[in-house]
């Protein structure tokens, strides 16, 4: 262990205690350094002037729309100025929750035309993400867009271009990118705590009908309450189907299935910790095992992604799995395996355990040694002990590390706080469109691999398919 590494590790372990104590002081904690954290908490205790108030519009008020809006409004100085949804009942609900005078519309373009709206949250079905985000940037609105940022691979680069031209802030909604637990894990990973990374296993399992996207459908769902024609804009017109509207994640025409939803969460966290741009080779497999409700996407899916060696990482492999009928229950974790240890992240923090090789290669045990004559065994053991001192024959030991976020901590809130900070300060958001597309593209490629039954080759630097 080098002196520099040892000093870095001691400093980090000391900061774990200090930072954990600070976190109890307030919810706005998305930096790792304790001094920066304290400064941030104090800053958010100050009142927000009217000139710093950010007025937002919400486009898509389903499950994530509600969650995003509720979280965004916890950030000081943020006000709701309008809501858009294609189902009238959800617009009624917005007015129930916020104000009977709240501006509501079924046409997102009308909301974008409002001069008093500074930023929009886009939480629609996936097939509308890129279209609405592009229009919003052209209307000079800041954009918070749910993941995946795009529905199709070809939408990525044009949206990135629209963002660059707009000079506006864009944040994509994979909140782990702003999590203090992931920031802490990244510090230790970068300090060499687990040695050289060689593979990552990431899983996201569920065991419920709602977890498998069979959401409640209102009894009044009809072409009279849902703007079905607008929902299908640019697509072949088909008869109204409430499941394809309220269960849109189950249909590849409107959603991106397990890969675009949960693979993206996993890959975003992996990229955040490793600073990787993404894999060069993607292959996936899956099946429709249990939820045979008309969906045309799998409910069990795996993918293998090959990451190349770069300036920031050695070559490593990522193995992903999502299971919507998991007898193991609802579980999600990411394990980063290095040559000297493992970082295991779950929703509450992470643990690091170690297994380090001794300098000596070993002799005896499950070995060919005992297949030789007694005389040969004694000669070989003497040679081994002469070459390797006793200390070199022992495995080095290193204490485990455990980090847990404080009760009530929300990385979702930190992600929105970062978005609004970026708007006020003229800085970049934690998950801009380049990062978001590099996380989403391998997952969309995994869908292509599954449906087309082939290996997908990807250029993660230039963000393009390779022949």
Image (cartoon, rainbow, N blue to C red):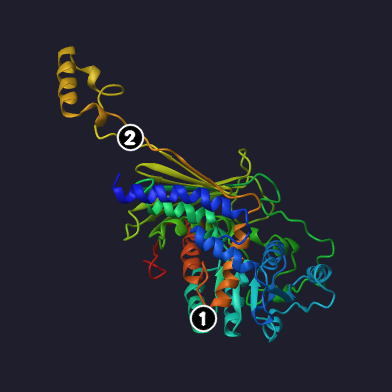
Q: Position of residue 374 (x, y in %)?
A: 18, 12
On the image, numbered disc 1 is attached to which residue? 162
Q: Position of residue 52 (x, y in %)?
A: 64, 79
Residue 65 appears in the rendering: yes
* Left or right for 344, reference 135: left
Instruction: Write the residue at 78% across / 68% down.
Output: 90
| Left or right position of 396 against 416 | left
Secondary element under disc 1, as helix, strand or loop, is helix
What whole-number distance in Å separates the C-alpha atoms at marks 1 and 2?
53 Å
* Nearest the eye: 298 or 279: 279
In the rendered structure, the answer to whether residue 466 lies left or right of residue 63 reads left
Query: Residue sitting at 60 percent across and 68 percent down?
Result: 43
Pointers 1 and 2 in contact (C-beta within 8 Å):
no
- Left or right: where 129 falls relative to 341: right
Residue 389: name its quadrant: top left
Vertical side of 98 occupied by 343: above or below: above
Quadrant hosting residue 170: bottom right
Q: Residues within 10 Å of mark 2 (few under 14, many from 20)?
A: some
* Residue bearing mark 2: 396
Q: Quadrant of residue 361?
A: top left
Furthest toward the top, the residue is 374
User: Is label 2 in a helix, a strand or a loop?
Assistant: loop
Q: Is residue 253 visible?
A: no
User: Quadrant where the N terminus lies?
Assistant: top left
Position in image of residue 455 (x %, y %): 41, 57
Q: Nearer the viewer, mark 1 or mark 2?
A: 2
């Amino acid at each position: 262990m080098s002196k520099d590494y040892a000093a870095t590790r001691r400093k980090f372990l000391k900061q774990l205690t200090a930072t954990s104590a600070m976190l109890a002081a307030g919810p706005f904690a998305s930096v790792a350094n304790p001094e920066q954290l304290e400064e941030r908490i104090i800053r958010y205790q100050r009142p927000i002037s009217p000139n710093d108030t950010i007025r937002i519009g919400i486009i898509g008020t389903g499950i994530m729309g509600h969650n995003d809006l509720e979280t965004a409004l916890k950030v000081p100085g943020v006000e709701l100025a309008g809501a858009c949804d294609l189902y009238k009942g959800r617009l009624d609900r917005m007015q129930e929750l916020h104000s009977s005078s709240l501006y509501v519309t079924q046409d997102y373009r009308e909301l974008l035309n409002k001069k008093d709206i500074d930023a929009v949250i886009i939480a629609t079905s996936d097939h509308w993400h890129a279209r609405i985000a592009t229009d919003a940037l052209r209307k000079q609105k800041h954009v918070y867009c749910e993941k995946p940022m795009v529905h199709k691979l070809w939408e990525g680069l044009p949206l990135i271009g629209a963002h660059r031209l707009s000079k506006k802030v864009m944040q994509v909604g994979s909140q782990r990118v702003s999590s203090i637990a992931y920031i802490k894990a990244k510090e230790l990973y970068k300090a060499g705590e687990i040695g050289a990374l060689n593979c990552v296993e990431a899983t996201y399992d569920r065991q419920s009908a709602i977890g498998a996207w069979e959401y409640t459908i209102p009894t009044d769902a009809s072409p009279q309450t849902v703007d079905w024609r607008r929902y299908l804009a640019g697509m072949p017109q088909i008869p109204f189907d409430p499941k394809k509207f309220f269960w849109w994640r189950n249909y590849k025409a409107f959603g991106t299935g397990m890969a675009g939803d949960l693979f993206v969460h996993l890959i975003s966290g992996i990229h955040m910790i490793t600073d990787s741009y993404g894999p060069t080779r993607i292959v996936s497999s899956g099946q429709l095992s249990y939820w045979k409700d008309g969906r045309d996407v799998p409910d069990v899916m795996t993918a293998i992604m090959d990451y190349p060696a770069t300036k920031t990482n050695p070559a490593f492999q990522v193995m992903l799995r999502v299971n919507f009928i998991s007898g193991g229950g609802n579980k999600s974790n990411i394990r980063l395996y290095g040559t000297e240890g493992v970082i295991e992240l779950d929703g509450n923090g992470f643990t690091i355990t170690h297994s380090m090789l001794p300098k000596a290669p070993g002799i005896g045990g499950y070995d060919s040694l005992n297949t030789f004559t007694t005389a040969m065994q004694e000669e070989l053991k003497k040679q081994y002990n002469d070459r390797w001192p006793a200390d070199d024959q022992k495995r080095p030991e290193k204490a485990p590390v455990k980090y847990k976020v404080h009760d009530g901590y929300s990385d979702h809130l930190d992600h929105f706080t970062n978005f609004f900070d970026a708007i006020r300060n003229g800085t970049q958001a934690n998950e801009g469109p380049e990062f978001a597309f590099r996380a989403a593209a391998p997952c969309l490629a995994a869908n292509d691999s599954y449906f087309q039954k082939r290996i997908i080759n990807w250029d993660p630097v230039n963000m393009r398919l390779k022949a």
